Image (cartoon, grey):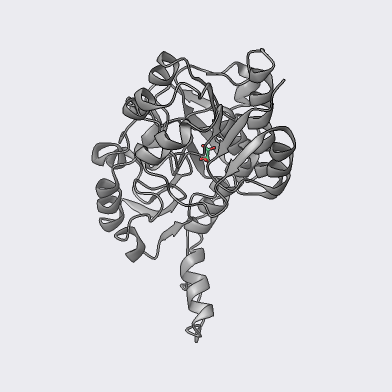
Amino acid sequence: MTRKAIWITRRLSDATLERAQRDYDCIINWDDTEHSADQIVEMSAKVDAIIPCHSEHFSAEVAARLDPRVKIIANHSVGVDHCDIPALNAQGIAVTNTPDVLNDATAEIAMLLMLGAARRAVEGDRIVRNGEWNFWSPAFMVGKQVTGARLGIVGMGRVGRAMAEKARGFGMDIHYHNRSRLPEDQESGATFHETLDSLLPQADFLSLHCPATPETAGFMNAERFAQLPKDAVFINTARGALVDEAALIDALESGQLSAAGLDCFAKEPGGNPQLAKFENVFMLPHIGSATVATRDAMGFRALDNLDAFFSGKTPRDQL
Ligand code: DGY
């Protein structure tokens, strides 16, 4: 079989790149430079497959212009909101993702954000770091207790369930909303809410773990933030598109939210400078899955999907 050519749009883990270069003729974007729609289209004429990240956008407009040489987009991400899958499929292009392998890493970051936001980690670090820690009082740096509190999870898929498992270690009472109720053995005692209207008033802490789709775009709006208990803590490790950031800012300003922990933003890279003025907002630059082990596993899963496709099989993660 002749070696296939692939375009790897970002610098993936060393182990992934080593295996990719062993098995394919690779064009690698070593510097992680951004590519415009025109550049993506131009690159597509040079390869049989693309391994992109969530940062490359394959809209219907781009899909229609891709070179027919490209047969598969093997995403290095579980989220596929950057891909118009029906439009890509209509061009005869298969699309895969990398589910499962990033559940724990992402749930770790959600826990970190939850703890950091609730216990005022950013403010505390700043005070010590800047030499501003010049007194102590029992009323100093008081936060919100996580242990025993009620956690609302929106989206009880693989990452949502990993989050629930870790939060149970903190004695949290887990409530969730999902398109459908989980089987009892997967619920592990969590309380199902058929609607957001029912879940949100229960959620002292609310963590998003659902995909960004046209249906979920901006669903965390002013009305939804107002349904949370006063002083709730809001966590987002899913996608920025799920949140109306102006409404989030209002909820922080009014004290409806006591804190927020965010790994995802409407604008990435960059985030929202308006959010940076709040000391009770703990922000990270979309690093939910950024551990060595998980990056290797994501890269290998994308390559497994490519290998299957080019040997005539249906890739395990074909969407
Ligand atoms: C994902 O896999 O969707 C993560 O957000 C990283 O891209």
In the drawing, does residue 279 fall left or right of residue 146? left
| x and y, in percent, of residue 5 in the image | 61, 31
Residue 316 position (above or below residue 30): above
Q: Quadrant of the N terminus?
A: top right
| x and y, in percent, of residue 297 in the image | 69, 37
Q: Nearer the viewer, residue 266 or 1?
A: 1
Whether residue 262 is visible to the viewer of this picture, yes or no, is: yes
Quarter of the image for residue 35 reads: top left
Quarter of the image for residue 168 reads: top right
Name the residue located 50 percent from the left edge and 23 percent from the top edge. 69
Q: Nearer the viewer, residue 310 or 160?
A: 310
Name the residue located 45 percent from the left edge and 58 percent from the top edge. 282
| x and y, in percent, of residue 170 in the image | 63, 46
Number of disc labels: 0
Residue 117 position (above or below residue 142): above
Whether residue 100 is visible to the viewer of this picture, yes or no, is: no
Name the residue located 44 percent from the left edge and 16 percent from the top edge. 89
Name the residue located 39 percent from the left edge and 65 percent from the top edge. 279
In the drawing, does residue 188 fall left or right of residue 155? right
In the drawing, does residue 90 fall left or right of residue 151? left
Q: Nearer the viewer, residue 192 or 72?
A: 72
Residue 87 position (above or below residue 29): above
| x and y, in percent, of residue 247 in the image | 25, 46
Residue 130 position (above or below residue 54): below
Q: Nearer the viewer, residue 48 or 268?
A: 48
